[in-house]
């Protein structure tokens, strides 16, 4: 039971980190005044 | 303090200076792909894993690949530790590692932290040590350097958010840097007497007639990557204080040099990549100034010792036969100078190996490793993480300098605007938030207080040190905290994960954002990043951001403990 809990915690943590990547990307687009695209 | 002690510290500093340039040139050639002596091996790995080495990844794909690799390898290690009892290379029939400890250990080694709440010699099988923990020692170090190189690429070129290929960086770092480097270092360590075998443990009879089991094993190979990759997890519970891990002054010196060689070399690599070698040296100088301040303070505090000892008639003056000062928790073969130096080096870098017990240092001596970690471990720092931590601070420095003179800040030709500063501030704020929140919770909750071995300010220092160490991915312990509980295993494991990945993501975003900007030529309004003024301003930003954030907590821990020691009260 606790094994499942630790595995789920690990998966949820990394899933959150992926969401965090997307959040940072969105923040970059919205706050990118002056940001040039090639 | 003795002249002999200072000479050894100066010799170490000279060695770090001497290896910076050759290491930096080698690292640049590894990551720009011009080094090819293992090309056939590389090609086989790329083909087997389906990697296209020419694929230049956008920063979001780079970060996702790093996260995916870390998640899968962490889960595999968790499973292997839980199934240890059924797996081979387990001559002493070690049982499965408890779930809470397996989670913390898997998280800790995946994140280059190597916090150990277990004794390696009585908990881990040879297979767990060699296949799981050593695997992470190599790959977590390679991930750190890869991330730093990705940030350097983001600054050095204009590529629309593309910062390199994570898989190529991971494989090339492991193949060209960590495997050969560890092989050479392991041979040097074996020559000095570090053991390397698969022999069963030996029972010895002591002079008092007692029986003592001497643990053996493949130590030198573990020790080499532990230092070179700034991992720090020891084969034995006593870590580098154990005579089978660190038997002589030479192994001690080699270990410390191995901890600093890649972080120091990366400053030179960075200078070459951004075509501003003087800036690379400016970062090196800032790192060295903080290192020198730390080692001087630690050596002074430990050589001075505990005034209560002197008041009670203990001879604390150094002589040819008496090291004097505070020798509690230190090995006689290393003495005070090398213990203070090792403690400074291991916490400047995010290594965490120890050759003395930091919990036994005087309050000010123990303050040095704690502050080193809390500054963000950018004093040379962990492999890769030290450089990218310092670059984030440099970005903040030019931003503040730009505000002072009223111009748009630039860093190495790239304009720094709101999104770059947002990422830098995310990086800077996550670190103290995790440390202080987890420390405060543990200082209040009965589960947190149950792990304390000391009362008063020293107890708070133990909790603060533990969460600083795991969040900073250091892994050293104050050794006075019983961390092997469900509460601490879980919280410390989470601390390592947040301290690594929640900081790496905004750093990689910063790399991507900078790579989208064109490089503008230097103008009269550009704040120069190669001058002593820049170094001083950078040091000021690091100290203000790092030290002042933690000053209230430090004042309740080691600082008040130091003041009370002067009044004759110890904890």
Image (cartoon, grey):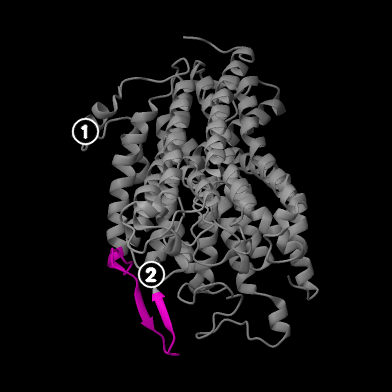
Which numbered dot is residue B39?
Answer: 1
Marks 1 and 2: CB-CB under 8 Å?
no
Tell me where residue B451 appears, x and y as whole percent.
67, 60
Tell me where residue B226 appears, x and y as whole percent.
41, 53
Task: State whether residue B472 is above or below residue B232.
Answer: above
Q: Are marks 1 and 2 on the same chain?
A: yes
Read off the residue under disc 2.
Answer: B215
Task: State whether residue B455 is above or below residue B548.
Answer: below
What main secondary structure does the magenta stretch of the protein show?
loop
Q: Secondary structure at mark 1?
A: helix
B92 magenta-colored:
no
The residue shown at (29%, 61%) is B188
Which chain does the residue under circle 1 lie in? B
In magenta, the rendered stretch is B190-213
Place residue B27 in its image quadrant: top left
Q: Is residue B533 left or right of residue B102?
A: right
In the picture, the quarter occupied by the N terminus of chain B is bottom right
Which chain does the residue under circle 2 lie in? B
Q: Residues within 10 Å of mark 1 (few under 14, many from 20)?
A: few
């Amino acid at each position: 039971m606790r094994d499942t809990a630790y595995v789920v915690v690990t998966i949820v943590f990394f899933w959150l980190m992926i969401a965090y990547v997307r959040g940072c990307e969105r923040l970059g687009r919205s706050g990118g005044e002056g940001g040039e695209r090639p | 303090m003795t002249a002999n002690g200072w000479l050894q510290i100066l010799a170490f500093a000279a060695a770090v200076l001497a290896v910076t340039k050759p290491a930096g040139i080698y690292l640049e050639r590894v990551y720009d792909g011009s080094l090819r002596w293992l090309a056939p091996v590389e090609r086989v790995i790329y083909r087997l894993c389906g990697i296209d080495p020419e694929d230049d990844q956008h920063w979001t794909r780079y970060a996702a690949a790093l996260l995916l690799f870390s998640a899968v390898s962490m889960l595999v290690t968790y499973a292997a530790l839980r199934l240890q009892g059924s797996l081979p290379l387990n001559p002493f029939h070690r049982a499965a590692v408890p779930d809470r400890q397996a989670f913390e250990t898997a998280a800790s080694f995946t994140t280059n932290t190597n916090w150990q709440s277990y004794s390696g010699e009585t908990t881990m099988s040879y297979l767990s040590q060699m296949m799981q923990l050593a695997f992470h020692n190599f790959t977590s170090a390679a991930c750190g350097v890869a991330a730093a190189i990705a940030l350097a690429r983001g600054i050095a070129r204009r590529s629309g958010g593309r910062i390199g290929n994570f898989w190529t960086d991971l494989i090339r770092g492991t193949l060209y840097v960590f495997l050969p480097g560890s092989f050479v270092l392991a041979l040097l360590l074996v020559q000095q007497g570090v053991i390397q075998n698969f022999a069963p443990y030996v029972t010895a009879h002591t002079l008092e007639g007692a029986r003592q089991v001497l643990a053996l094993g493949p130590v030198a190979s573990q020790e080499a990557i532990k230092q070179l990759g700034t991992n720090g997890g020891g084969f034995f519970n006593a870590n580098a204080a154990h005579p089978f891990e660190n038997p002589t002054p030479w192994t001690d010196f080699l270990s410390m040099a191995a901890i600093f060689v890649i972080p120091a070399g990366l400053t030179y690599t960075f200078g070459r990549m951004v075509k501003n070698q003087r800036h690379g040296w400016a970062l090196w100088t800032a790192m060295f100034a903080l290192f020198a301040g730390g080692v001087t303070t630690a050596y002074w505090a430990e050589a001075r010792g505990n005034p209560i000892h002197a008041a009670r008639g203990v001879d604390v003056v150094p002589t040819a036969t008496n090291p004097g000062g505070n020798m509690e928790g230190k090995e006689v073969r290393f003495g005070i100078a090398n213990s203070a130096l090792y403690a400074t080096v291991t916490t400047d870098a995010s290594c965490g190996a120890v050759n003395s017990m930091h919990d036994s240092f005087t309050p000010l001596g123990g303050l040095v490793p704690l502050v080193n970690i809390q500054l963000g471990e950018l004093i040379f720092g962990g492999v890769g993480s030290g450089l990218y931590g310092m670059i984030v601070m440099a970005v903040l420095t030019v931003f503040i300098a730009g505000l002072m003179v009223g111009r748009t800040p630039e860093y190495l030709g790239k304009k720094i605007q709101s999104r770059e500063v947002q990422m830098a501030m995310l990086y800077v704020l996550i670190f103290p938030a995790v440390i202080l929140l987890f420390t405060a919770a543990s200082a209040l909750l009965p589960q947190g207080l149950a792990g304390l071995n000391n009362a008063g300010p020293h107890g708070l220092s133990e909790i603060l040190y533990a969460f600083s160490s795991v969040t900073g991915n250091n892994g050293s312990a104050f050794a006075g905290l019983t961390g092997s509980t469900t509460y601490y295993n879980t919280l410390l494991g989470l601390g390592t994960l947040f301290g690594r990945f929640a900081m790496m993501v905004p750093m990689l975003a910063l790399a991507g954002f900078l790579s989208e900007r064109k490089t503008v030529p230097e103008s009269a309004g550009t704040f120069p990043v190669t001058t002593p003024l820049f170094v001083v301003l950078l040091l000021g930003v690091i100290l203000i951001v790092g030290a002042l954030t933690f000053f209230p907590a430090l004042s309740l821990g080691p600082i008040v403990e130091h003041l009370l020691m002067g009044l004759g009260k110890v904890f």
